[in-house]
Amino acid sequence: LSQPAPSPAAAAASFVCLSQPAPSAAVVAAASLVCLSQPAPSAAAAMIGGGSSGGGAAGAMATPMLAVGILDDCNERLSHKEVEQRRREKAKQYFDELRSLLPCGAESKFDKNTILQNTIAMIKQLQAELQHHKETRETGAKQVARSGLPSLPASQDYHHSFEMVRQPLCFCGLDGLVWESNQAFSQLLGYEHKAQVTGLSLLNKTASTDNEASSQHWQRLISSGMCNTAFYCQLIRKDNQTLTVNMDLNLVHKRNNPYCFLVATNPTT
């Protein structure tokens, strides 16, 4: 009660301090160290400050403003550190994705410079291959135009020929299951509609006496890298009658890998 009433400036400084958000423990510790590092005022300075209301107000205002400045500086440093941490994590994510797209795979231990170097090399290679493919296609089109030869038939033309040819034909998977057949093949096996043949196994439709030898021909064609082979075998018709045929197997590749078989069957007389 013996102290004089604070000035309006001191009251405003107190309001600024109370309106700030509660600082973290680290920030409070930093502010305390700064305050403690200040030299203690002498007795004369304390008496002068206590005797003058103006000096007391100025001291009361300077201390809260110093604490506010320290808090703002610490908060700014923490915010900058978080942004930098997020940036580094995002950059690491992008480099990991680039590493997984390279031929070496995601398990490689390349550093960032090596990843960028290999990525650039791969992009240049793809661009060169694309340009070569484009030039080859344009050159082929010009040669066909100069020679006057007709263009290659469309896939629907091939499909029409596949249907209308008299030779029994079918496409089979590498496991021997029939994917598609023409009408002549279905009639050879005694079925009225070619849809009834789809899904049948040619290996299962082979007579038991020829089954093992036929399987060896199929597997040998896949593993040897050969394109075709022919052999005699007996097929079981729908009415359980056997029919001796000369089976011509043609291995079809897709992207340099075995894909399916084109099977031509020629009945023996």
Image (cartoon, rainbow, N blue to C red):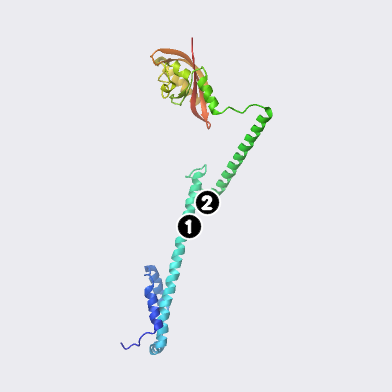
Q: Position of residue 17 (x, y in %)?
A: 38, 75
Which image quadrant is residue 6 in?
bottom left
Residue found 60% across the figure and 39% down from its top: 130
User: Looking at the picture, does residue 61 appear above or below residue 155?
Assistant: below
Is residue 91 something one can see in this rendering? yes
Mark 1: which amino acid? Arg
The residue nearer to you, when weighing 217 against 148, is: 148
Q: Residue 159: horizontal and vertical position, in percent?
A: 52, 25
Q: Seen in the image, is 205 located left or right of residue 252?
A: left
Q: Secondary structure at mark 2?
A: helix
Q: Give how far apart the Cα atoms at labels 2 and 1 are.
A: 15 Å
Residue denoted by label 1: 87
Q: Could you tell me residue 249's position as x and y percent?
A: 50, 21
- Using a 10 Å C-alpha cutoff, classify the residue at mark 1 as few (fewer than 14 neighbours), some (14 to 19) or many (20 or more): few
Residue toward you, 13 or 190 = 190
Q: Amino acid at mark 2?
A: Lys
Compared across the picture, whether 146 is left or right of 241 comes to right
Q: What residue is disc 2 on?
A: 112
Q: Secondary structure at mark 1?
A: helix
Q: Residue 44 vs residue 124: left or right?
A: left
Query: Residue 263 shows which numbered tag?
Result: none
Closer to the camera, 97 or 130? Answer: 130
